Image (cartoon, grey):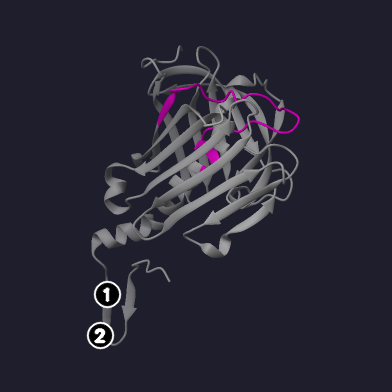
């Protein structure tokens, strides 16, 4: 059972027991800061960041280029710099000559928030370059109290996904892969820059989270001009929705939005996750290619 360190009444001593101010503030932040970084990572994009392929759209993987790196500042409530998410992509070659793209997402709390809640998480996805198929998902992280350590491998010949959860062995399972080729949400959100969707259009996607698969529809909501740490951009706002039997944050009224710049590199310059306990926003603060740092054109 988790001790939330909230003020309590001690009738034996006949007085109020009030925890240390730092413990009290930690208790106020605990629930929100426990879930915000990881939900953003798993639902947005590591994150806020990518959702593309179904069986109707097979083909080479195009979401990331070799050497690309996206750095996002996470703001939440009154905290301007509550965390940081870094997404990087690197091409690799297996012994049999097959080329894959390894996408790594590092999430960590920063600034004042880290003093109360030290959260670190790394997620990896390995995707076959030729087919765009997700081969492996791996995630490991901790806040010092709660731990994440899981891995999913995909066997398309047998249409099975093997999920191993070392932190919660009871969740380990082998589940059928539904029709369509699943992808991690991060790669999906980033790949939207290649879709050229117009306002009012939508595209179906199949996303994997742990031992479950979720069919989503990605809607182009409309155009929006925004200011970011990298400047002003004309963007297209994309909103993923779970239209049938909503689960997770979608069932609880949560919402994700992604702003894709409409010129230059067409980058996901901003993402937003709205939950009952608040709203977290990811601002793209740095974008790099393999050769050199490059600021996307406005």
Q: Place residue 157 in its image quadrant.
A: top right
Count of number-bearing discs: 2
Q: Which one is nearer the viewer's eye here, 9 or 259?
A: 259
Magenta span contains residue 27: no
**Disc 2 to disc 1: CB gap under 8 Å:** yes
Residue under the image location 72 percent in, 25 percent down: 201
Q: For mark 2, give the secondary structure.
A: loop
| Above or below: residue 99 compared with residue 107 | above
Q: CA distance from mark 2 to mark 1?
A: 9 Å
Magenta residue span? 42-71
Q: Which one is nearer the viewer's eye here, 275 or 159?
A: 159
Residue marked by disc 2: 13
Judge whether residue 47 can be spotted in this image.
Answer: no
Residue under the image location 32 percent in, 58 percent down: 26
Question: In the displayed structure, does residue 111 sit left or right of residue 104?
Answer: left
Residue 236 coordinates in the image, percent (x, y): 58, 22
Residue marked by disc 1: 17
């Amino acid at each position: 059972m988790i001790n939330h360190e909230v003020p309590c009444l001690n009738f034996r001593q006949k007085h109020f027991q009030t925890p240390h101010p730092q413990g009290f503030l930690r208790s106020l932040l605990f629930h929100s800061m426990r879930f915000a970084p990881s939900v953003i990572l798993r639902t947005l994009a590591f994150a806020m960041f990518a959702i593309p392929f179904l069986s109707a759209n097979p083909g080479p993987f195009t979401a990331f280029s070799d050497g690309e790196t996206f750095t996002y500042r996470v703001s939440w409530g009154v905290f301007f710099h509550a965390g940081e998410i870094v997404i990087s992509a690197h091409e690799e070659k297996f012994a049999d000559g097959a080329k894959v793209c390894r996408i790594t997402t590092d999430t960590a709390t920063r600034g004042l928030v880290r003093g109360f809640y030290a959260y670190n998480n790394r997620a990896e996805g390995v995707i076959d370059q030729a087919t765009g198929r997700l081969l492996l998902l791996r995630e490991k992280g901790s806040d010092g109290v709660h731990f994440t350590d899981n891995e999913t491998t995909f066997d398309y010949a047998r249409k099975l996904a093997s999920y191993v959860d070392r932190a919660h062995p009871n969740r380990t399972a082998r589940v059928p892969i539904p029709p369509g080729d699943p992808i991690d949400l991060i790669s999906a959100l980033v790949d939207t820059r290649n879709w050229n969707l117009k306002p009012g259009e939508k595209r179906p996607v199949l996303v994997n989270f742990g031992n479950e698969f979720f069919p989503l529809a990605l809607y182009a909501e409309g155009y929006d001009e925004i200011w970011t740490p990298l400047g002003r951009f004309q963007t297209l706002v994309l909103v993923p929705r779970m239209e049938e039997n909503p689960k997770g944050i979608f069932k609880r009224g949560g919402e994700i939005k992604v702003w894709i710049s409409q010129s230059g590199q067409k980058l996901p310059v901003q993402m937003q996750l709205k939950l009952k306990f608040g709203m977290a926003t990811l601002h793209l603060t740095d974008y790099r290619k393999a050769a050199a740092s490059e600021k996307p054109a406005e």
